[in-house]
Image: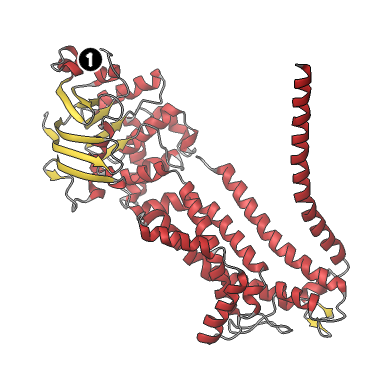
């Protein structure tokens, strides 16, 4: 059951402006679990996420070496079908970005891009996505309202629902609760715990506490390097590296 | 202390007074020009003035051929300038890499906007009228006006496209969209009001220009209506120039009447652009 879903091998990456980068990161992400990437800001966590769905193609990457495998598919191969890849690897961003259309259209957008035209199928996907993101009851009678009229917490769950509507295999979450109040955060976290039974989840948390709460596996990333990678409980109770311990206990941040 | 405070109040009042004066000095001439023209034009304005051809060497009758001519020239300009201008802007904003080449192209476009319109007129005369043998015609005039309008349309369209938040594009791509799908389904619809506004403002300038059509399209006196793109035509701005300077004994209300019609035509387009922009802004979700 806990197979390796994403395998990152000796990944190094640098942007042309020399800012954020990754140095020789190797990491196996297991399916049906939440793997947390945590560490100080600017350490390369987002970069790592964006490499897995090749969203870094949109930015100015100067050098890139190493391998990323998704079920034996070479993700970084230039010949990889990016559209197929991004349907298998969904992403939720730090700021909830709802597209300027109705709640319903936000849900069906991805499928329509893929050419789905069958009405009942689209209707079904709307309900499926919203239920999976624990948003269905709240927006049931507002499906045709502009998505921007939802609250911040609802918008972020809508972004999650939009990803789930595509039935991906891996979900990347880049500080999905950074703009949310504690109640909305709790809802998102509870949803993730349910979702991990079906999906492979990679989460960049917005705090060490969230990392400790949610992690099945945890990777501590500092200045582009993977310092320590272990089972969540293990890492947060008995960190092996001094730097991990210092960070967890709040001695630097 | 009290003296200092009083001085600061005085300076403040003088400052605002100066700014108010500058504002009045800007607005007053516009109101005077529009008001004067409409007032002096009133005796000439009638259905007959709009719907009849000029008679008696333009000293009587209406200006229908000039109105129709300006309409066709503007439409012709739009037909050419909109697809090319919007297309180029989409390419530059969404697809073109940020290379030395694209920077050169951008600078060229900005400089094109600064070329005097008479130069466009002479260029149109050389290329369309003489070399391509279109003759003095609506076609040659429209093409000339289109080239003059392109830079305006390209830069305003690019601006409208860039105003659409980058995050929409990122999300669309992350959901498995191609770049073209993202442009067509998200970026273009969101930028459309801005594009339409820019297009109208560009066309409005084209509609009011005299120099570019002087050698390429405009006829001094041609009372019949044009019936093919290869016909020369009367046009409002050129007609106004002719009856104001070239025809002795012109009744003055006809001059003002023609100016008023041109003004309403151009201001009407301006108003349309403003309405589109403000309505879109009210509906915008970002």
Q: How is the image coloured?
A: secondary structure
Q: Which corner quadrant of the image does residue B48 belong to?
A: bottom right
Q: Is residue B207 left or right of residue A160?
A: right
Q: Quadrant of the N terminus of chain B?
A: top right
A146, B260: nearer the viewer: B260
Kindly tell me whether residue B268 is visible in this rendering.
yes
* Residue carrying label 1: A246
Q: Is residue A100 left or right of residue A32?
A: right
> Number of labelled discs?
1
From what the image shows, is residue A172 above or below residue B277?
A: above
Image location (x, y in percent) of residue B53: 77, 80
Q: Residue at x 13, y 16 (%)?
A: A240
Q: Which corner quadrant of the image does residue A94 belong to?
A: top left
Image location (x, y in percent) of residue A73: 13, 45
Q: Residue at x 33, y 30 (%)?
A: A133
Report helix, strand or loop for mark 1: helix
Q: Which corner quadrant of the image does residue A89 belong to?
A: top left
B115, B94: nearer the viewer: B115
Q: Residue at x 88, y 68 (%)?
A: B43
Q: Residues within 10 Å of mark 1 (few under 14, many from 20)?
A: few
From what the image shows, is residue B43 above or below residue B220?
A: above
Image location (x, y in percent) of residue B160: 50, 51
Chain identity of mark 1: A
B97, B153: nearer the viewer: B97
């Amino acid at each position: 059951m806990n197979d390796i879903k994403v395998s990152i091998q000796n990944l190094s990456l640098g942007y042309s402006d020399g800012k954020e980068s990754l140095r020789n990161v190797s990491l196996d992400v297991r399916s049906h679990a939440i793997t947390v990437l945590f560490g100080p800001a600017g350490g390369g966590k987002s970069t790592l996420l964006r490499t897995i769905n090749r969203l870094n193609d949109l930015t100015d990457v100067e050098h890139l070496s190493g391998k990323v495998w998704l079920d034996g598919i070479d993700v970084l191969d230039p010949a990889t079908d990016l559209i197929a890849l991004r349907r298998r690897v969904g992403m939720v961003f730090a700021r909830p970005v709802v597209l300027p259309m109705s709640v319903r259209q936000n849900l069906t957008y991805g499928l329509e891009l893929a050419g789905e035209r069958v009405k009942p199928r689209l209707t079904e996907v709307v309900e499926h996505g919203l239920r999976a993101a624990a948003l269905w009851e709240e927006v049931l009678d507002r499906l045709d309202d502009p998505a921007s009229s939802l609250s911040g917490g609802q918008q972020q769950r809508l972004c999650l629902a939009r990803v789930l509507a595509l039935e991906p295999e891996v979900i990347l979450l880049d500080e999905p609760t950074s703009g949310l109040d504690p109640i909305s955060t709790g809802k998102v976290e509870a949803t993730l715990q349910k979702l991990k039974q079906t999906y492979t989840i990679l989460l960049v948390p917005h705090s060490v506490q969230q990392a400790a709460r949610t992690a099945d596996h945890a990777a501590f990333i500092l200045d582009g390097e993977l310092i320590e990678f272990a089972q969540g409980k293990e890492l947060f109770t008995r960190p092996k590296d001094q730097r991990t311990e210092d960070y967890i206990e709040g001695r630097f941040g | 202390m009290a003296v200092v405070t009083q001085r600061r109040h005085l300076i403040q009042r003088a400052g605002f007074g100066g700014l108010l004066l500058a504002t009045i000095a800007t607005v007053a001439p516009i109101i005077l020009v529009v008001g004067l023209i409409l007032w002096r034009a009133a005796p000439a304005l009638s259905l007959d003035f709009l719907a009849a051809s000029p008679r008696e060497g333009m000293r009587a009758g209406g200006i229908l051929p000039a109105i129709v001519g300006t309409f066709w020239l503007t439409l012709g300009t739009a037909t050419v300038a909109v697809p090319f201008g919007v297309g180029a802007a989409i390419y530059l904003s969404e697809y073109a890499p940020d290379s030395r080449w694209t920077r050169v192209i951008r600078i060229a476009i900005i400089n094109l906007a600064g070329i005097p319109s008479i130069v466009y007129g002479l260029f149109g005369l050389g290329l369309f009228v003489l070399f391509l043998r279109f003759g003095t015609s609506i076609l040659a005039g429209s093409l000339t006006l289109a080239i003059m309008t392109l830079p305006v349309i390209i830069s305003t369209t690019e601006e409208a496209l860039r105003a659409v938040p980058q995050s929409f594009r990122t999300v669309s791509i992350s959901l498995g969209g191609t770049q073209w799908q993202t442009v067509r389904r998200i970026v273009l619809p969101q930028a459309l009001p801005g594009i339409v506004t820019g297009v109208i403002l560009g066309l409005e300038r084209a509609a009011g220009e005299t120099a570019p059509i002087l050698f390429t399209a405009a006829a001094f006196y041609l009372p019949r209506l044009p019936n093919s793109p290869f016909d020369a035509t009367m046009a409002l701005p050129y007609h106004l120039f002719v009856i104001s300077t070239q025809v002795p004994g012109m009744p003055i209300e006809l001059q003002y009447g023609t100016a008023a019609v041109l003004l309403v035509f151009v201001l009407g387009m301006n108003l349309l652009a403003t309405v589109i922009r403000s309505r879109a802004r009210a509906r915008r979700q970002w």
